[in-house]
Amino acid sequence: MKDKSSLFRILLALTATLLLVILIVAAFSIYLSLDDNSSIEPTPSIIDISQTHSPEPTDEPIKTVSLSYAEPSDFGFSQDGIDNLDNFIESEINAGFPGAVIMVARNDNIIFHKSYGYFKDV
C-alpha cells in the first residue's frame, strides 16, 4: 500500500511540474516571438463555457472554431523565436523531462504545434 501512495505522490508532482513548464514555455514563446513593434492584444473567448456546461439539457449547438495553419510572420511571430522555443523544449526532453505538447495560436490560426517526449514505464 505504501508503494501506491508514493507512486501517486510522484505522479502528482510530475503533473504539477508539467503544468508549470507549459505555462512558462507559453510565456517564453510569446516573449521570444514578438517583434519589437508588436503588442499583445486580448483574444476574445472562442468557447462560451456557460453554453457547454449547462445544468439542464439544451438544444443550442456548442460553439466551435476551426483552426488553420499559418506562417509565424503573418501574425507578428519571428521564426527565430519559434526555433528558440523548439530548441528549449528539445533540450529539456534530452535532459530527462518526460514530454510536452506545445501549440501557439493567434486569431484562429495555428502558428506552431509539436509534441515532444517519450514513454517510459515507471
Image: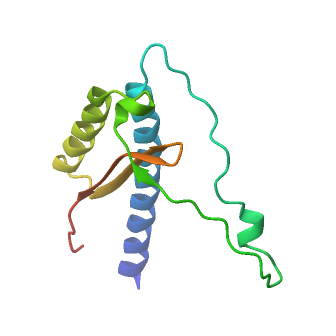
Above/below status of 57 relative to 62:
below
Q: Which residue reaches farthest right?
A: 56
State the residue in front, 11 or 43: 43
Q: Which residue reaches farthest top?
A: 36
Q: Which residue reaches farthest left?
A: 94
Q: Quadrant of the C terminus?
A: bottom left
Q: How many marks?
A: 0
Residue 60 quadrant: bottom right
Above/below status of 36 relative to 75:
above
Q: Position of residue 64 (x, y in %)?
A: 60, 64
Q: Position of residue 12 (x, y in %)?
A: 45, 65
Q: Is residue 55 left or right of residue 90?
A: right
Q: Quadrant of the N terminus?
A: bottom left
Q: Position of residue 112 (x, y in %)?
A: 34, 45
Q: Residue at x 50, y 20 (%)?
A: 38
State the residue in front, 65 or 57: 65
Q: Residue at x 76, y 68 (%)?
A: 51
Above/below status of 73 relative to 119:
above
Q: Is residue 41 left or right of residue 92?
A: right
Q: Please, which colouring scheme is shown? A: rainbow
Above/below status of 107 relative to 29:
below
State the residue in front, 10 or 104: 104
Q: Position of residue 98 (x, y in %)?
A: 26, 58
Q: Is residue 88 left or right of residue 108?
A: left
Residue 62 quadrant: bottom right
Q: Residue at x 26, y 37 (%)?
A: 88
